[in-house]
Image: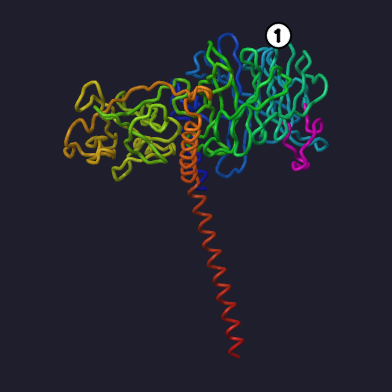
Amino acid sequence: MKKRLISVSLLLLIFLFPIEGQASNPVIKDRYSADPAALVHDGRVYLYTGQDEATSNDHFFVLKKWSIYSSDDMVNWEYEGSLDRTAFEWGIHDTAWASQAIERDGKFYWYTTVKNKSTEDPGYAIGVAVSDNPVEGFKDALGEPLITSSMTTIPEFMGDDPWNVIDPTVFIDQDGQAHLYWGNTHLYYAKLKDNMIEIDGEIKTIDIQNMEGTFTEGPFLHQYLDQYYLTFAYNYPEEIGYAISDSPEGPWEFKGKIMDRIPNSGTSHPAVIEFNDNWYFIYHNTALPGGGENNRSVAIEPLHYYDDGSIAKITPTASGVSQESYLIEPLDSDLALRQVTMAIRLDQVDDQQYDYRWYESESLASIGENYVSYQIDNSPGVYLTKTDDDQLKLEKNDGTIEFAERASFKKSEGLADSDAYSLQPYLNEELYLAIKDDGKTIALVNYDQIEDDKLATFSIEIADPIIPPAPDQASDEQGSEIKEEKQDESEEVKQSEFEENDDSASEQGHDSQLTLIIIILFAIIGLASYILLTKKAK
């Protein structure tokens, strides 16, 4: 009951205190969202998502409906409405899984994943709804699935309740031919007839050439210049990779990884769009309070192509499409505030490393214009906070008012320079963020203990966006690989710590159970030894 009350409280806080009008991730802040896809129509972007509604008592995805949002600037998103899973009467359970919509000849076709209630053809299936409007009026176009598992080669390990028919992606080529991909562990392909609600020809199982790992799910097809791109989730926990082809039918050649796994989520789901001459990558993370495996949130990043058509690796950020991440540097210094595996310190500044990047937003606590909050830019949802004993700490937002207050800082004119800034925690404005005696430690210090005002004065400026160099532009390829490997190792350690924090209660429970088992085993061994010794004595 206590867990349920906590979950309800978190959800209420999300709905009551949304942060709107900021180009930050997640882009949907008033509810959970997942498995995104998008289309551009008449100068607006329409975003189609699932809506995670799992509680602490649920151990799997709970998606009762799909949601629709729109934007004309990729910053401000308007909730347009939803489509219930029950729109597909042949479906069952809360299985409004991944979907994608597309426009053709003035009609909008929304391809969805739904679990089929048929006992003769069980498992997940693909349905299609149609409307004259991108946000309302969608109706089941067939009254039955478009594709079921029985129409495909089912992986043996999935048994009698397969889930290989999920995650549809649809693309209409310049010649008017519509192409459909979908799948889990197997990648399937078929053409669609002009009416968009019938398969045209056979269903094919597709292999991606030179694949590093195994295809999992979530394909998304798009075109850039004269090349076709298939982004998808691969391995598990899922990473995002991509393949290219000269044709939307393939063959496909694996080209590399573009996003690492998402902390606290086994799944990942890509979508790619062009809007106002810019390219964007859409996915989900777990950054909202209470976020995790079954409560995800849609986020968006800029997408960058190199001259050869390859895609730059993408780092999930809090700053998102704005790319407004900050360097926090002490006055007259070549150092900057850095986070390494959840520790805060000052180091020689490297503006090409996300360890030094912070996302500044309005304060989580609704206090006033001069108050801000700071997230680690490459760890959305993790904030700089003041602890009860006046220490600085990096913590995942738990959605409480108490956390919001601890993560809020007054940003005022610098003590030593009016063009710079000083930071004071909202809960104790007698303290300042300041450099300690060793010159490498940052802490909260009483003003009367600060020897020089410069030690509590910082330059806080937006840094240039980080775009990883193209592979053929690296001056020292081996050194670059070593550097990336070390950064990846740092990310893995940090990611592990985040997950350990989120799962600490669960782990403590497991530890307690293990301890109890060990005690019982020792007791049994001791009793057995006693019985044997007694028999020998007799």
Q: In which image quadrant can residue 64 be found?
A: top right
Amino acid at the residue labelled 1: Asp
Above-or-below relation of 340 to 172: below
- Magenta includes 169? no
Is residue 288 at all visible to an observer of this figure? Answer: yes
Q: What number of labels is visible? A: 1
* Residue named by callout 1: 105
Above-or-below relation of 57 to 407: below
Which span of residues is magenta-colored? 147-165
Q: Could you tell me residue 102's position as x and y percent?
A: 67, 16
Q: Nearer the viewer, residue 56 or 239?
A: 239
Considering the image in quadrants, where does the C terminus appear? Answer: bottom right
Q: Could you tell me residue 532's position as x and y percent?
A: 60, 82
Please, what secondary structure does the residue beneath circle 1 have?
loop
Which residue is pictured at 53% across the width and 20% down the height? 303
Report the coloring of the rendering: rainbow
Q: Nearer the viewer, residue 102 or 254?
A: 254
Which residue is pictured at 54% across the width and 59% down the height? 513
Give the overall secondary structure of the magenta segment. Answer: loop
Q: Nearer the viewer, residue 210 or 81?
A: 210
Is residue 81 at all visible to an observer of this figure? Answer: no
Judge left or right: residue 256 versus residue 184: left
Q: Residues within 10 Å of mark 1 (few under 14, many from 20)?
A: few
Judge left or right: residue 436 versus residue 175: left
Q: Could you tell me residue 80's position as x and y percent?
A: 57, 19
Q: Could you tell me residue 166's position as x and y percent?
A: 70, 31
